[in-house]
Amino acid sequence: MAAAQPQPIRLVAGLGNPGDEYAETRHNAGFKAVDELARQAGVTYWKDQLGAEVAVIKVRDDEAEDGRREVVLVKPQSYMNTSGGPISKLCQHYRVKPTEVLVIHDELDIPAGDVRLKVGGGHAGHNGLRSIIDKLGSCDFSRVRVGIGDPPGRMAVADFVLKQFRPKEAEEFAETCARAADAAATAVTRGVIFARDHVNGSAGSNGKH
């Protein structure tokens, strides 16, 4: 079944694992992208709320009552496999519908360095997405997918996504996550469909294919 047309985004969740040992790993693409989104918005303080680090920003929205819309930035602190718990609780607290949620996550099925947007869909084996779908009871949230490519050789997926970067890899990954943050910002301010149509397949903005 096709996902519903997304409403203006009111909550952006970046997926990852808390702790310094996971900071420079592929699985923390969502955290890095949300951190960059927060930096661009001038966020200086994150609060602990309902199992997540949370910051609330305001973006221009001509349809909103005062011309600005609140957007909740979220980094679940419950580890990847149970990300859905804090996100679901925050959606209830801020009265956010699944169609108003944007999730940023790493994606094995997309070439490393690529960034794509998607509305709805399954979890494709991603445990963070699986948890969110389970806890929200819906798959109709939108996603910014940060391509990490396939593991080399016979390396296990878990080892690949949690492997610490070499300095050059870390630099390239940071650039990819910055593009993911830009894609998320476009989705928030101009709509997911506009962002999807302008980001997906654009080699100039997405890097390698």
Image (tube, rainbow, N blue to C red):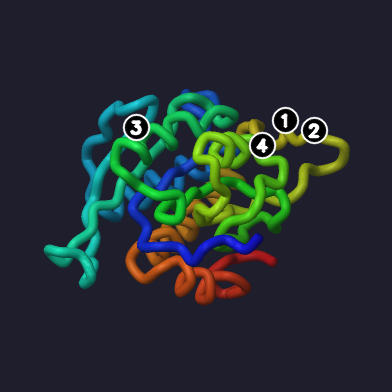
Point out the image quarter for the N terminus.
bottom right
Pointer 2 with pointer 3, Cβ within 8 A: no
Pointer 3 with pointer 4, Cβ within 8 A: no
Look at label 1 and name its amino acid: Asp
**Residue bearing mark 3:** 53
Question: Is residue 190 rendered to the left or right of residue 105?
Answer: left
Q: Nearer the viewer, residue 164 or 78?
A: 78
Of the two numbered discs 3 and 1 on the same chain, state the one appearing first in sequence: 3
Q: CA distance from mark 3 to mark 1?
A: 26 Å
Mark in the foreground, 3 or 4: 3
Q: Nearer the viewer, residue 95 or 209?
A: 95
SS at circle 4:
helix
Where residue 81 appears, x then y in whole percent? 59, 29
Point out the image quarter for the C terminus.
bottom right
Look at label 2 and name its amino acid: Ala
Of the two numbered discs 3 and 4 on the same chain, state the one appearing first in sequence: 3
The circle drawn on residue 195 is none
Where residue 175 appears, x then y in whole percent? 50, 55
The circle drawn on residue 159 is 1
**Residue bearing mark 2:** 156
SS at circle 3:
strand
Q: Residue at x 16, y 67 (%)?
A: 67
Question: Is residue 57 rendered to the left or right of residue 101?
Answer: left
